[in-house]
Amino acid sequence: MGSRIRGDRSLRGLFDRLEADGPEPARRRRVLAGALVVAALLGSNAWGPADAGTGSVVWFGTADLLQCAALIATAFLLVWRSRWVVWAGAVSVALVLLGVWFDVMTVEGGGASYAALAVSLLIKLPAVVVLVALVGRGRRW
């Protein structure tokens, strides 16, 4: 069975390899992966103008605060291996995708639009995929 796990290149295979060493090292790796994903999303959330070209600083700040709170709650629930991580993760993913849409659609033209697309495609969307995979493991706890 070990050779089958080692040869699997999918995201599920990655998580199977992470848990192959036993519960404690797997927990440390899961915590590290969750922390890196949350840090990447929180760091990319701090990027960008305060106004985003819409004239609504209140909406922009509220959406970002909700997203940060959901990501932090998801990180804590991942560490505690709570079944509630599925719900917090679903809210986090929805808010990150809302933030991606908001960032891309409301940015002024020119270089800022390319920067918004780059951050969305290279940081936020891959981190969402990993977050979905991590949270999906919570269904089995």
Image (cartoon, grey):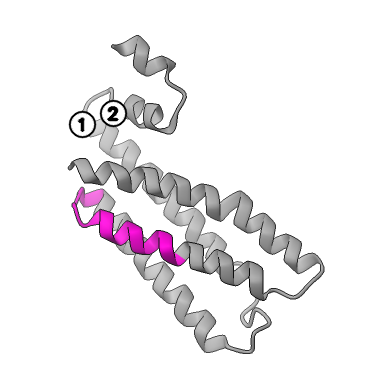
Nearest the camera: 88 or 73?
Answer: 88
Residue 48 in the image, given as x and y percentages of width and height = 64, 71
Q: Which mark is residue 19?
A: 2
**Secondary structure, magenta segment, majority class:** helix
Q: Quadrant of residue 27?
A: top left
Instruction: Determine the image quadrant of residue 117.
Output: bottom right
Marks 1/2 in contact by CB < 8 Å: the verdict is yes
Spatial separation of the CA atoms under disc 1 and disc 2: 7 Å
Residue plotted at (69% across, 73% down): 107
Task: Name the amino acid type tagged 2.
Answer: Glu
- The residue under the point 28% across, 11% down is 1
25 part of magenta stretch: no
Q: Position of residue 131 (x, y in %)?
A: 40, 49
Give, as a three-letter code, the residue at label 1: Pro
- SS at badge 1: helix
Dot 2 lies on which element? Answer: loop
Is residue 42 shown left or right of residue 5?
right
Q: Which residue is mark 1?
A: 23
Residue 16 spot, x, y in % from top left: 32, 27
**In this view, 18 is above or below 141:** above
Q: Viewer-proximal residue, 39 or 101?
A: 101
Quadrant of the rendered image containing residue 92: bottom left
Query: Neighbour class for label 1 at 10 Å: few (<14), some, many (≥20)?
Result: few
Q: Is residue 82 magenta?
A: yes
- The number of numbered badges drawn on the structure is 2
